Amino acid sequence: MASKINDSSRPLTSVSRLSSQDARTNEAKSRNRPLAFKDGFESSTTKPAPGQLPRLPAPPPILGLPAPTTPTPAPTTPVPPEAPTEPPVSVDSDPMTHIEYLASDALQGRDSPSAGLDAASVYVQAHAEKYGLVGPNINNPENPFQQKFNVYSWLGADKAGETAGAAHAGHAEHKQFGHTMFQEGFYLDEKMPKDTLKKLNQQYEQTMKAAGQSVVPARAGKQRSVEELKQVATATGQAVNTMAMLPGTGPHKDEVIVVMAHLDHVGVDRKGNPYNGADDNASGSAVLMAAVPELAEAAKNGKLDRSVLFIWTGAEEKGLVGSQYFVDHPIPGLELKDIAGVINTDMVGRWDDQRLSVVDTNTKGQPNYFRDVVDQANQQLADPFDRINRDINVYRDRQDGASFGRKGEDVLFLFEGLSNPNGGGDLIPEYHRQDDDIDKIIEDNGGNKPRRVKDLLLNVINIAANRTTEPQQQPK
């Protein structure tokens, strides 16, 4: 792994940042604004030509614009339409812009796999390309912004979901945050590492036992092969990790800070009604998108030493499948040894905008280097968070960062927190329900919470990417 940090960094130069203070001036308008974007999208089984993106759904409206009070009179003479203009950077830098699109009915809950998740991936990619980020996956020359993988489930496992009280087709109801690895789905291929195959064998036995189904024994030895597991599994389709690289410009540009959020949610119910997942996890995905313009400007000005890899994972809701697939299938030039820190952002939209919860410990519960980074980054804010709670260590292995943490990487997990402002309590009552929609974020904090998390994230990335390094002695 890349060497870790000890020192602080120089401040980040930002461009046209929509500050939380500016956002508060529009809070009254945005709090009760009806959601307008409900356009649909067209999916097609026709494969696009190499290098050609699928058709994007219509872009979302800019949040907070008041409706006109009187109709505009028609001109007496025809006026040619104005040429379309790019939205201002401040719009692209506002997470609420992206939450409104990602959590719209049009994306049908962004299940893994689904046309809605594919459309979300296209939307994210177009945003990254607009600011000059590049697709790093040379193993997929057709589209290096994507890493595709097949998703499987166990034959007969649906009975386990029914026993637990299925929330909707294919996804068992649960109220504890997150998933453990391969809890409801998994990937299978011949390049699967031995430790992942072992874990999958164990998961198969546990799932069948919970479903009251018989277990097919291994043909030889104690462990079933990939081919044997395929015989007791069913393929549900192909999901996607969406990734974009912002190359660093300094002497440590070959080292990479991974910044991630899961793009998927849990789809629709049996009647086709979507679970929009505005907080889980359109909010985290949107925060990453909103950070792109300012980081791209920093890189352009030579103020980003290390590179930053953004990953919007798929199939997190199945059991951290997309993140585990990435870890198990390293991209050339992006092996674990090149990674110098991982930041995962999940559910950062709700409650008040003055508190946040983090996990900044390793698998032994000891603080990692992000402990000091977060505190320093918070103090650099014009209006620091009142409370940075460290009350969610129980979730450390139930989020995408765990796929990296098991490999010894330092991981920071950013989370909105629980119901008690001072730490502890319960999840939002809308967790994995159909009322997890953008209006709940607006009601709680007017959109300031995700905006402030973005500001904090920018500071964290700046410190991590521009730090000075010393060789770290590897454990013997």
Image (spheres, rainbow, N blue to C red):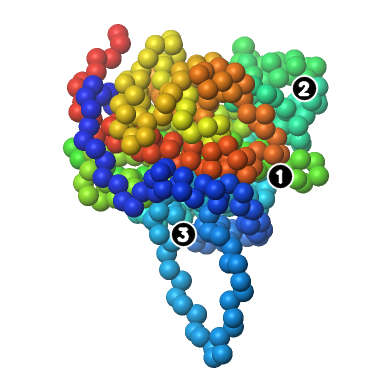
Front in this rendered view, residue 313 or 127: 127
Front in this rendered view, residue 395 or 315: 395
Q: Determine crowd level at label 1: few under 14, some 14-19, many 20+ residues with C-alpha closer than 10 A.
A: many
Q: Determine crowd level at label 2: few under 14, some 14-19, many 20+ residues with C-alpha closer than 10 A.
A: some
Numbered disc 1: secondary structure: loop
Residue topped by disc 2? 164
Separation of disc 1 and disc 3 at Cα?
Answer: 31 Å
Residue topped by disc 1? 274
Between marks 1 and 3 in the image, the one whose residue lies nearer the viewer? 1
Residue, x 54% and y 38% (percent of image)? 445
Between marks 2 and 3 in the image, the one whose residue lies nearer the viewer? 2
Circle nearer the N terminus (2, 1) = 2
Numbered disc 3: secondary structure: loop
In the rendered image, the residue lying farthest to the bottom is: 77
Q: Amino acid at mark 3?
A: Gly
Q: Residue 51, which numbered label?
A: 3
Q: Amino acid at mark 2?
A: Ala
Residue, x 49% and y 84% (percent of image)? 80
Residue, x 46% and y 48% (percent of image)? 25
Circle nearer the N terminus (2, 3) = 3
Is 36 placed above or below 214 here? below
The x and y percentages for residue 107 are 64, 50
Is 143 placed above or below 429 here? below
The x and y percentages for residue 418 are 56, 23
